[in-house]
């Protein structure tokens, strides 16, 4: 096992004085200290060679490896392994070469200021990430702690809340927690107008109005929430489809024939950090998918122009695949070959020709073949009757 040469130290607004003796000794003995301007200011009393975050930030690992053989300290804010640089470094450098020294995180400090139990709070970061991804977490009575990306982020989130009928949500911005200049700003989303420091943590207590939009994380959002041309996987079928795809934390979906993106978006909303690549040859539908992804809290949906099976070449191997368009034996073969072990495959068909393909694939590969028929109560003159949608044949199987 390699000896630990790299120390990643969490530091707070109280600087060196807030560190436990062991962590402070590590910082004071460092030959190289790497961090942002704020981190260097908080540890200015230590005379060591100072290195700023590299640009681009992805060069950090090369920078660190260049200092092997020296006593190296990376300074991070709070807990280096909670939405921080420590996890990024630990994926590239053997963890046996790293010693972590956590400090109280911004989430812990914010929860203490708010009197909230962390076990009952959703902790999110939009720091350096699309702010829209927090939309998926807007729920009645939900408490959120959000690491923001700048002074404008609270106002953006206030707008998201208000637009969705959560204008009465209580918001608090907490800045410089634990330091001499700690600040707090309180308000509600519909009238939020505070000017806040760029480095802050946002606490939100979601309060729903009677007409608020309810957007659960489980699949089956109303069709009307999606911009579409009418060609989409409808609500009830979509719920069954995503359930068979089994969204999991960090898993990747290929959505072949993504259309307006409804399946990919519901997949991403259903599990933390779930990813999706949508393949769609029509520009108008790609534009609709992008619009829906932003509006529904899945801004990281990757949308590709292409036709299958050629468009699948070179893509990262997926954990699940949905074929909603472009179904053929050739597309299945290419997709199945790329699917990771224990990967889930789901294909839907509404035409006789596509159904024939699924029937043949089912005969060759097994799995489950079902027909889904949905009927809705609609007016028939002055009365009400059942109006059936087109039946959908669905085939699903797991790669063993």
Image: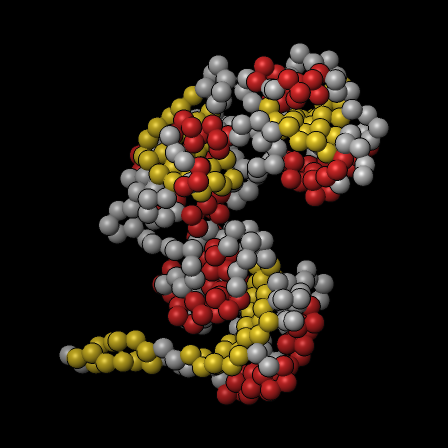
**Spot occupied by residue 98 in the image (x, y as percentages of width and height):** 73, 34
Q: Determine the residue located farthest toward the left in the rendered image.
A: 382
- At a point 78% along the width and 29% down the height, the residue shown is 5
Query: Residue 29 lies in what quarter of the image?
Result: top right
**Spot occupied by residue 44 in the image (x, y as percentages of width and height):** 66, 14
**Spot occupied by residue 126 in the image (x, y as percentages of width and height):** 52, 40
Q: Determine the residue located farthest toward the top in the rendered image.
A: 45
Q: Determine the residue located farthest toward the front in the rendered image.
A: 1
Rendered-image quadrant of the N terminus: top right
- In the image: residue 361, left or right of residue 48: left
**Spot occupied by residue 375 in the image (x, y as percentages of width and height):** 32, 78
- At a point 24% along the width and 50% down the height, the residue shown is 210
Total numbered badges shown on the rendered structure: 0
- Is residue 23 or residue 186 the one in the foreground? 23
Rendered-image quadrant of the C terminus: bottom right
The colour style of the image is secondary structure
Please tell me whether residue 375 is drawn above or below residue 150 in the rendered image: below
> Can residue 357 be seen at all in this image of the molecule?
no
- Is residue 112 or residue 154 the one in the foreground? 112
Query: Residue 323 lies in what quarter of the image?
Result: bottom right
- At a point 64% along the width and 39% down the height, the residue shown is 87
């Amino acid at each position: 096992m390699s000896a630990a040469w790299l120390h990643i130290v969490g530091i707070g607004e109280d600087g060196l004085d807030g560190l436990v003796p062991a962590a402070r000794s590590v910082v004071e003995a460092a030959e190289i200290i790497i961090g942002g301007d704020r981190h260097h200011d908080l540890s200015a009393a230590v005379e060591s060679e100072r290195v700023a975050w590299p640009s681009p930030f992805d060069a950090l690992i090369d920078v660190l490896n260049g200092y092997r053989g020296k006593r190296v300290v990376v300074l991070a804010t709070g807990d280096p392994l909670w939405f921080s640089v420590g996890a990024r470094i630990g994926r590239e450098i053997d963890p046996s070469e790293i010693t972590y020294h956590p400090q109280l995180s911004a989430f812990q400090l914010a929860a203490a200021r708010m009197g909230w139990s962390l076990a009952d709070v959703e902790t999110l970061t939009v720091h350096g990430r699309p702010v829209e991804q927090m939309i998926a977490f807007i729920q009645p009575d939900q408490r959120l702690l959000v690491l923001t990306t700048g002074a404008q982020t609270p106002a953006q989130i206030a707008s998201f809340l208000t637009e969705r009928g959560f204008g009465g949500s209580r918001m608090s911005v907490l800045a410089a927690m634990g330091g001499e200049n700690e600040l707090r700003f309180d308000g509600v989303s519909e009238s939020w107008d505070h000017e806040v420091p760029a480095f802050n943590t946002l606490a939100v207590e979601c309060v729903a109005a009677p007409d608020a939009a309810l957007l659960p994380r489980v699949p089956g959002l109303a069709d009307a929430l999606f911009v579409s041309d009418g060609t989409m996987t409808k609500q009830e079928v979509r719920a069954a489809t995503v359930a068979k795809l089994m969204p999991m934390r960090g898993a990747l979906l290929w959505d072949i024939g993504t259309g307006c993106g409804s399946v990919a978006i519901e997949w991403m909303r259903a599990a933390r950090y779930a990813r999706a690549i949508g393949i769609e040859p029509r520009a108008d539908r790609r534009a609709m998918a992008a619009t829906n992804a932003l509006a529904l809290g899945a801004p990281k949906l990757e949308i590709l122009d292409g036709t299958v099976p050629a468009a699948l070449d070179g893509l990262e191997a997926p954990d699940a695949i949905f074929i909603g368009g472009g179904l053929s034996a050739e597309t299945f073969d290419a997709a199945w070959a790329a699917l990771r072990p224990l990967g889930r495959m789901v294909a839907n068909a509404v035409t006789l020709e596509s159904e024939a393909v699924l029937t043949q694939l089912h005969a060759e590969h097994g799995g489950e073949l079902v027909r889904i028929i949905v009927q809705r109560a609609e007016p028939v003159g002055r009365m009400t009757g059942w109006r059936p949608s087109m039946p959908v044949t669905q085939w699903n199987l797991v790669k063993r």
